[in-house]
Amino acid sequence: MTTKTQTINLQGKLQRLGVNRITKILIGILATVPVAVSLPVQALEVEILPKKARLGDTISVLIELESQDQPGIPTVAVGEQTYPAFEIAPNKYRSFIPTTPLEKPGVRKVTISGEGQRQRNMAVYVGDRKFRIQRITLPPGKAGTQATEYELQKVKEFKALQTPEKYWNGVFLTPNKGRMTTTYGVRRYYNGKFANDYYHRGLDYAGAAGSAVIAPAAGRVALVGTVSQGFKVHGNVIGIDHGQGIISIFMHLSRINVKEGDIVKPGQLIGAVGSTGASTGPHLHWGLYVNGQSIDPMTWKTKTMD
Ligand SMILES: [Zn+2]
């Protein structure tokens, strides 16, 4: 009974006030609370994988938005560093965070934010890992081969790629049939002095000179360099852009079967093992980079990172 009376009273009031008056009143109310009305806060669902990360792992940040009304792409930040997120399904985004042996183990604060979305802070624990140690003795006055400026610039530009296209699918293949001789993350002492910035940025395979090097996953050939062009350290080199900040580099090749711009399939022959550049014997060095940092390719070979 009470409800009915109130409804009738309100209708009568509305009729007396007229539509224009109502509009003015509503505008007045809206003007006093602009934030609540113009920026509807949307929910951000976040999942971070793996549950137990260790140094060298690639951390996957999966973000789901409640609706598509606000099309802002979310961003992911760890400290000063921001990482791009790419759409992997409607309203679903994914960002990769690299971790390396140069970092300290412990908790990382991951901040996920996007236009019109409530910012979320997540804590991720990155566990320690023991990396093998090599002791290198260099003869006095010999610092090893020096890279050329051209070589450094070309490789730097290649490692900075964050192409929106996603070329790879499923697990990565082993790029050469040779035995793995040096694992990822090995640290070094040179003449008894610990090299703070050094870690083995990839995997070495001791394939015979001339043995096949295949693409571990699909991608676009974004770098081809040769010794004659000045690639003194890398030697003859191929870089594949797998998309979304994931890139592969293949060093010390004796032969190159692809050119820049080629789209390669997983398992496609791209070159042959050699000992060009700063190399002491025939082997393939394969480096896998995530947003500019060398991570352990083993996780990409054993797990699907789709
Ligand atoms: Zn190597």
Image (cartoon, rainbow, N blue to C red):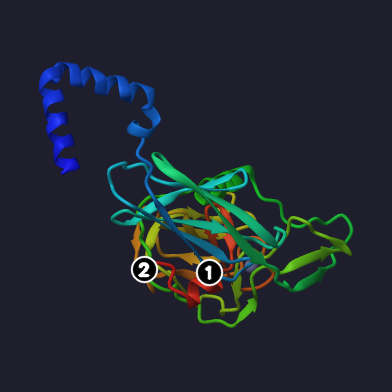
Q: Are marks 2 and 1 in contact (CB under 8 Å)?
A: no
Classify 10 Å Cα crowding around label 1: few (below 14), some (14-19), many (20 and above): some
Q: How crowded is mark 2: few (under 14 residues within 10 Å), some or many (20 or more)?
A: some
The residue nearer to you, when weighing 269 against 11, is 11
* Element at label 1: loop
Residue 243: name its quadrant.
bottom left
Q: Position of residue 88 (x, y in %)?
A: 34, 58
Q: In this view, does 58 lie to the left or right of 22?
A: right
**Outermost residue toward the front?**
1
Residue 206 is left or right of residue 6, and the answer is: right
Residue 294 drawn at (x, y percent) = 59, 60
- SS at badge 2: loop
Residue 288 or residue 244, whichever sits in front: 244
Picture disc at residue 298: none
Q: Is residue 251 visible?
A: no
Does mark 1's beta carbon lie closer than 8 Å to ligand 1? no
Which residue is disc 2 drawn over? Answer: 169
Q: Report whether residue 146 is seen.
A: yes
User: Please, what is the three-letter code of the amino acid marked with disc 2?
Assistant: Asn
Q: What x and y, as percent, mark residue 213?
A: 47, 72
- Residue found at x 14% / y 40%: 4
Please give the name of the residue rendered at 37% of the width and 27% of the height, measured from the top-left corner. Answer: 34
* Picture coordinates of residue 212, whole percent (x, y): 46, 76
Amino acid carrying label 1: it is Pro
- The quarter of the picture where residue 195 lies is bottom right
Of the image marks 2 and 1, the number of the one nearer the N terminus? 1
Residue designated by label 1: 50
Q: Judge left or right: residue 81 versus residue 117.
A: right
In what quadrant of the picture does the C terminus appear? bottom left
